[in-house]
Amino acid sequence: MTPSRRWWLVGATAFAAAAAGGWLASRRTTVTSEEDVAAVHLLFAQKLPDHAGTTVSLDTFKGRTVVLNFWATWCPPCIDEMPELAELHREIAPRNGTVIGIGIDSPSNIREFAEKHQFPYPLLVAGMAGSELSRKLGNSSAALPFTVVIDRSGQVVDKKLGRIKLGPLRERVNAVLPR
């Protein structure tokens, strides 16, 4: 086999492997599993304080399209995406949708941040217990930011580890919102 043919074969094999890995990753993040169902039940059973200390029962969000964003004040990509999440929240709120921020941080850090920035969606305080909740929703590394889209029936329809891109997230959310 000639060197150029060998490189072509190696390149084609690498491309095929990357494509297969991408397909598997996308399937893993968009198909609701039994674990997702259990995690969504756990999520809606939570009662978490908001930045002001008022307890919020997450079961009040059942029946709505929820964009759940795990974040922290010390996480630059988390902070960078928050204005876009605020824009999305304003767009979907009239159509029975909401963004919810779950802070993996201290109550004082989240309170100080929320008072300074005034986002239109709830910023709830989960502390380190939020890392476990994000793991149950599919974030095996517990890295931040991590965003999950849950439709009105409680099905996980999308997951994104890392900074969101507003366009694709908006499309995914609009696909499951009522018209």
Image: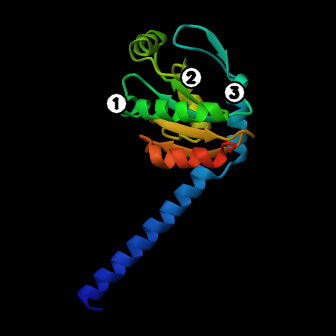
Left or right: 86 as drawn, with respect to 61: left
Q: Check disc 2 and give the amino acid type.
A: Ala
Q: Which residue is mark 1?
A: 76
Whether residue 135 can be seen here:
yes
Mark 3 residue element:
helix
Left or right: 130 as drawn, with respect to 161: right
Label 2 – label 1 distance at C-alpha: 21 Å
Q: Is residue 172 above or below residue 54?
A: below
Label 1, residues with CA under 10 Å away: few <14, some 14-19, many ≥20: few
Q: Nearer the viewer, residue 165 or 35?
A: 165
Label 3 – label 2 distance at C-alpha: 20 Å
Label 2, residues with CA under 10 Å away: few <14, some 14-19, many ≥20: few
Which residue is at 34% across, 77% downward? 10
Quadrant including the N terminus: bottom left
Residue at the farthest left position:
3
Q: Is residue 92 above or below residue 46?
A: below
Residue 108 percent coordinates (x, y): 44, 9
Q: Are marks 2 and 1 in contact (CB under 8 Å)?
A: no
Which residue is at 58% across, 42% downward? 138
Q: Which residue is mark 3?
A: 61
Label 1 – label 3 distance at C-alpha: 27 Å
Q: Which residue is mark 2?
A: 129
Q: Nearer the viewer, residue 134 or 147?
A: 147
Residue 96 percent coordinates (x, y): 67, 33
